[in-house]
Amino acid sequence: MNAKGDDRGALDLCALIGARICHDLSSPVGAIANGIELLAMTGGADGPEARLISDSAAGASARLRFLRIAFGGASGAPVSGHEAGDILQVLHGGGRMVIDWQVTDAVPRAELRLAFLLLLCVEAPLALGGHLRVTRGGTGWHLAAEGERLRADPAHWAHLYGEQDLPGALTANDVQFALAPLAARALARPLQVSLAPSAIDLRF
């Protein structure tokens, strides 16, 4: 099998695994959220404990929706840019990493998958705080991140540059660095990566 076929096979397998996990978890998470809503309607869920459960269920649901796109299949109907922005707002609203999501049009799922994988790549360097602006226009996607204290692993980012293979001891937290180049090649959209001490610029 050629390299392109190997890439697609790896992406397809990842998509199947991601879809299975998200599918199995979405039902119980949804049931928790529905249960809290029913309790609220009967006056049995009025307090900080219930609000904590409700907020946690909403966060878990948004996380599953995000992961289903990032690690799921590229086929299917386009995703509304507003819907993607809502997911990110739930996940990052009020957090250290501020996301300025400027995409409002419907987006092909394969493009959004790559954008979400790259967003995951940016999360770690911005763990101490920063700003990420995401736009999509005639020239493609642009993710521009800024932070005073970026913590970027050189080996992982060198793989995005296409300069070297990933280290053998890749952890689950870093799997997006392995998948993003595969997703970019599947789209025939080369990644353009610029990494500076206080800024990251990604385009495809």
Image (spheres, helix red, strand yellow):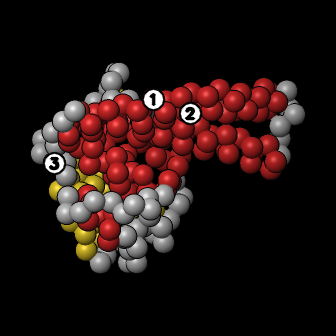
- Tell me the SS state at disc 1: helix
Say which label, 2 or 1, has the lower sequence index. Answer: 1
- Tell me the SS state at disc 2: helix
| Crowd around label 2: few <14 · some 14–19 · many ≥20 (10 Å) | some
Across and down, in percent, residue 138 comes to 12, 41
Q: Amino acid at mark 1?
A: Leu
Across and down, in percent, residue 127 comes to 48, 67
Q: Quadrant of the N terminus?
A: top left
From the image, state whether disc 3 or disc 1 is nearer to you.
1
Q: In the visual, does 96 lie left or right of 119?
A: right
Q: In the visual, does 198 lie left or right of 57?
A: left
Say which label, 3 or 1, has the lower sequence index. Answer: 1
Q: Residue furthest top?
A: 77
Across and down, in percent, residue 62 comes to 54, 40
Residue positioned 40% across, 68% down in the render: 125
Looking at the image, residue 121 lies above or below residue 77:
below
Give the number of marks.
3
Mark 3 and mark 1: span between their CA atoms?
A: 24 Å
Mark 2 and mark 1: span between their CA atoms?
A: 9 Å
Q: Amino acid at mark 2?
A: Ile
Residue 110 numbered mark, or none: none
**Residue placed under numbered mark 1 in the picture:** 16
**Residue placed under numbered mark 3 in the picture:** 190
101 or 64, which lies in front? 64
Say which label, 3 or 2, has the lower sequence index. Answer: 2
**Residue placed under numbered mark 2 in the picture:** 21
| Crowd around label 1: few <14 · some 14–19 · many ≥20 (10 Å) | some
| Crowd around label 3: few <14 · some 14–19 · many ≥20 (10 Å) | some
Q: Quadrant of residue 85?
A: top left
Q: Amino acid at mark 3?
A: Pro
Q: Is residue 142 visible?
A: yes
- Tell me the SS state at disc 3: loop
